[in-house]
Image (tube, grey):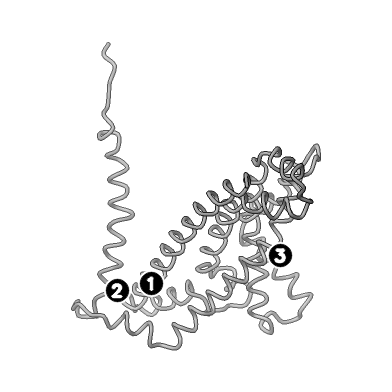
Amino acid sequence: MQTLRFSRKTLGIPYAVFLLLFVALPLIVLFYYAFTNGQGQFTFANLTGFFTDPNTLGTLCYSFAVAVCTTVVCLLLAYPTAYILAASHFRRKQALLLIFIMPMWINFSLRITALKEILNLLEGNLARYPFFNAVIGMTYDFLPFMILPIYNTLSKLDGSLIEAAKDLGANDVSAFLKVTLPLSVPGIVSGVSMVFLPAMTNYVVLDMLYNSTYIMGSLIGSYFAAYNWHGGSMIALILLGIIIAFTLFSRTLEDDGGNAGAGGAFL
């Protein structure tokens, strides 16, 4: 009986078809609606309209501010947590790490609904503190995505580097700042990317907390709900460009940080 052998090109056909149908074609449709008007004529009006409309610019700035604050808060909470777990000698630190991951196993709607009830009890009216509640909701939802990559990076660091730094006269603070922190940059960058990008576009949290439309995802949805596919497609395309630019920038930082940390560890 002959053994069937397939070339790599043959095995790659299903993936190529998938990419064509579910990646390339939707992008082509997005570009078409973004750069055409209601009559199907090519135009830049949708692009210029985005940057001249105070509503869209304000929503973009608000989304960016929410994403930045959420990322900063997550980083401030996640790094000490990941560092303590990675550096500790707890026998069951994997179980402690599991505590931070377990909320991700619960239905998203149930978690946000529970958070909404807690905030209602504490504040009385969620609408009074929309930005604050948005950051709390996003942080609650995305914190595990910041902890995990930082923990994975810290747990793989070579402890002999810390010992070498201390043998050369560095105290605990200097060893952390010159060895541990630079070498953990790839985990930090990865965590920032995993938090900032979804926080920039996630509108479900805000909608469930106080029915907000002041975020890019909600704005895109409102355009399509009003059958303005051209304006909505342009906003989605601009947001896609921002995400791609941030991804490339974060990858550059990750590479530079990893190289600088590896070099600095031996200086």
The residue singled out by tag 1 in the image is 238
Q: Secondary structure at mark 3?
A: helix
The residue at 73%/50% (across/down) is 175
Q: Is residue 104 above or below residue 124?
A: above
Q: Is the Cβ of the residue at disc 2 closer than 8 Å to that at disc 1? A: no
Question: Left or right: where does residue 39 sit relative to residue 66?
Answer: left
How many angstroms separate mark 2 from mark 1 (CA)?
10 Å
Residue that protrudes farthest toward the right in the picture:
90
The residue singled out by tag 2 in the image is 34
Q: Kindly identify the amino acid type of the residue bearing the numbered disc 1.
A: Ile
Residue 43, horizontal then vertical, whole percent: 23, 80
Mark 3 vs 1, N-terminal side: 3
* Total count of labels: 3
Nearer mark to the viewer, of 3 and 2: 2
Q: Is the Cβ of the residue at disc 3 closer than 8 Å to that at disc 1? A: no
Mark 2 vs 1, N-terminal side: 2
Q: Is residue 119 above or below residue 110?
A: below
Residue 107, horizontal then vertical, whole percent: 62, 56
Residue 222, quarter of picture: bottom left
The residue at 63%/49% (across/down) is 148
Residue 129, horizontal then vertical, whole percent: 68, 81
The residue singled out by tag 3 in the image is 114
Residue that protrudes farthest toward the top in the picture:
1
